[in-house]
Image (cartoon, rainbow, N blue to C red):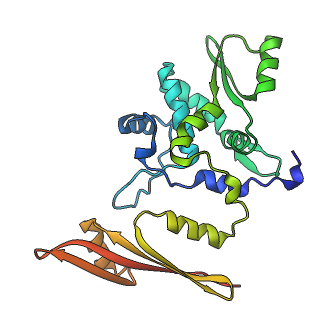
Amino acid sequence: MDSKQIDFKNHSKALNELIFEAKDLQGISRRTVHSWKQSGVLDDKRDPNALRRWNYFSAIDIIWMGILNEMKQLRFTHTEMKAIKEVLFETLTAEDNKEYPAMEYYTFLVLLYNQPIYIVISYDKGIDAIWMLDERDYFLKLKSGEIENHTALSLHKAIKINLDPVYKLPNFSQTAGLTDDETKILKIIRNKTFKTIKVTKRNGDVDSIEGIERIQDLDKIEKLIESGEYQNMEIKQQNGKIVSAHRTIRTNFARK
């Protein structure tokens, strides 16, 4: 790989966008997710100040939960899972001279270069070593005897099983090269609460984006009215009761 041509920054952005919902999880119950968060093996990324603390997950979260589920089937304890998490999410310096969590970096290798990667957990009296290895290094360590009693989990299999049904193993290079403004627009477009979105351009650049958001949470509607946090809002009533609201949100893009 030519390090001069590698820049994982945009791939990292794509992998860490919180765009998945609980329904996208493969064979993992909400109760299990809750227990993982309680024990610290899964980070809780919900906004503590939000009225409704919905669960949204990134592609990395989805992959990690797939691996956690494999470990759960193999009877790993939460304490062991947490120890493995600490190793897999340690940062390393990649070819673009930037730091990424190890699991994120090796996920780049799987998605971009179809590189098989194994999570190898070696143990004697408990876990004594954890590696992330490509196929060559894995079999070299087996041959040398450095790895004896162990469990090997396939990262590429976890990606295939857990991302394919919802993401069809995307080519993350499609988002590489997007400007910060274009990335912001993409996030707004992916927000499922917007009914319509209008993008206005000036001199070839995005000047503003306007979206109409549908809100059915009555508590949120009341708080928005009280705080005045809206530019334009249409209230819908049924039998004299408020049933929903449509709020117009406009984002202007500053130009240098």
Tell whether 153 sits left or right of 7. left
**Most distant residue in the bottom direction:** 203
Using the image, determine if residue 152 lies above or below residue 194: above
Residue drawn where x is 62% and y is 66% of the image = 183
In-front residue for pair 50/60: 60
Splitting the image into 4 quarters, where does residue 252 fall? bottom right
Residue drawn where x is 68% and y is 84% of the image = 204
Residue drawn where x is 64% and y is 56% of the image = 13
Using the image, determine if residue 211 lies above or below residue 27: below
Q: Position of residue 253 (x, y in %)?
A: 60, 81
Tell whether 64 sits left or right of 34. right
Figure disc tally: 0
Q: Position of residue 235 (x, y in %)?
A: 25, 79
Splitting the image into 4 quarters, where does residue 243 fall? bottom left
Residue drawn where x is 53% and y is 34% of the image = 66
Tell whether 91 sits left or right of 231. right
Q: Position of residue 35 (x, y in %)?
A: 40, 34
Q: Position of residue 164 (x, y in %)?
A: 56, 42
| Any part of residue 185 in sight | yes
| Any part of residue 79 in sight | no
In-front residue for pair 143/48: 143
Quarter of the image that includes the N terminus: top right
Splitting the image into 4 quarters, where does residue 240 fall? bottom left
Quarter of the image that includes the C terminus: bottom right
Using the image, determine if residue 247 lies above or below residue 27: below
